Image (cartoon, helix red, strand yellow):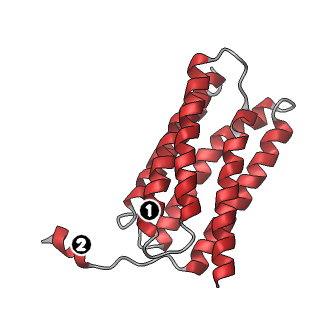
């Protein structure tokens, strides 16, 4: 009975105004993160390490806030799962980063791949009721591919890795969020 009832109840839609603010905020955070990553990469390694921990933590927070604004965690399973994955990755990066940066980059790769699939799922689910989802769908797909690249680099490369290796990934995320926000602003 509960399952059939849940199927017939309409979930709250994400308002274009909320999504525009949300996507704009994500774009700004990611752009600032990229600038900080390139600025402190070699000069301040401890700050670079903190940035690697902060990125999935921000993703966890952002997914929770968005899910809560659009019907709650139960109504948004892909975002709920994304928040859980991001929280676990934040802990894993914090644990591994001090001992081996390659392992931390590998964890970021696993996260990027999983978060990409979940972002893709959110975009596909939202596209029926919300505009500007194709950049989110593209971003999720690209994130999944980038995650595979990070994982390969972490496992098979002996070259030095740093926070700057993650910055292009974050820059593309900023780009896709900005495009979604711009599309919503123009359509209003």
Location of residue 36 with respect to 119 vertically, above or below: above
- Foreground residue among 25 and 148: 148
Image check: 9 left or right of 108? left
**Label 2, label 1: how far apart the Cα atoms are:** 17 Å
Q: Which mark is residue 7?
A: 2
At numbered mark 2, what does the secondary structure look like: helix, strand or loop? helix
Q: In this picture, is 94 found above or below 86?
A: above
- Residue positioned 67% across, 38% down in the render: 52
Q: Residue 186 location, x and y as percent?
A: 69, 79
**Given the current orientation, which residue lies at the most extreme bottom position?**
188
Question: Which percent across, then down, holds residue 14?
Answer: 49, 75
Asked if residue 101 shows in the view, the reply is: yes
Against 14, residue 134 (above or below) is: above
How crowded is the residue under tag 2: few (<14 C-alpha within 10 Å), some, or many (20+)? few
Crowding at dot 1, Cα within 10 Å, few <14 / some 14-19 / many 20+, comes out as some
Report the front residue among 20 and 175. Answer: 175
Please give the name of the residue rendered at 27% of the width and 79% of the height, measured from the top-left corner. 9
Of tags 2 and 1, the one toward the viewer is 1
Residue 157: numbered disc: none
The answer to whether residue 95 shows anywhere in this view is no
Which mark is drawn over residue 124? 1
Q: Earlier in the sequence, mark 2 or mark 1?
A: 2
Measured as percent of width and height from the top left, residue 177 is found at 65, 61
Residue at 64% in and 81% down = 187
In the rendered image, which quarter contains the C terminus? bottom right
**Horizontal relation, residue 115 to residue 182: left or right:** left
**Which residue is depicted at the point 50% across and 47% down?**
115
């Amino acid at each position: 009975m509960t399952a059939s009832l849940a199927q017939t109840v309409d979930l709250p839609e994400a308002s274009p105004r909320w999504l525009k603010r949300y996507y704009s905020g994500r774009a700004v955070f990611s752009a600032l993160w990229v600038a900080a990553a390139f600025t402190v990469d070699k000069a301040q390694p401890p700050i670079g390490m903190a940035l690697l921990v902060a990125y999935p933590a921000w993703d966890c927070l952002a997914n929770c806030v968005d899910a809560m604004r659009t019907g709650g965690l139960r109504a948004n399973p892909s975002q709920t799962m994304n928040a859980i994955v991001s929280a676990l990755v934040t802990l894993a990066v914090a644990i591994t980063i001090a001992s081996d940066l390659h392992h931390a980059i590998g964890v970021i790769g696993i996260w990027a791949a999983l978060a990409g699939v979940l972002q893709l799922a959110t975009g596909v689910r939202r596209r029926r009721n919300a505009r500007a989802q194709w950049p989110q769908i593209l971003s999720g797909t690209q994130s999944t591919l980038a995650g595979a690249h990070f994982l390969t680099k972490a496992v098979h490369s002996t070259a030095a890795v740093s926070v700057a290796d993650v910055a292009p990934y974050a820059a593309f995320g900023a780009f896709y969020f900005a495009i979604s926000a711009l599309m919503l602003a123009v359509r209003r």
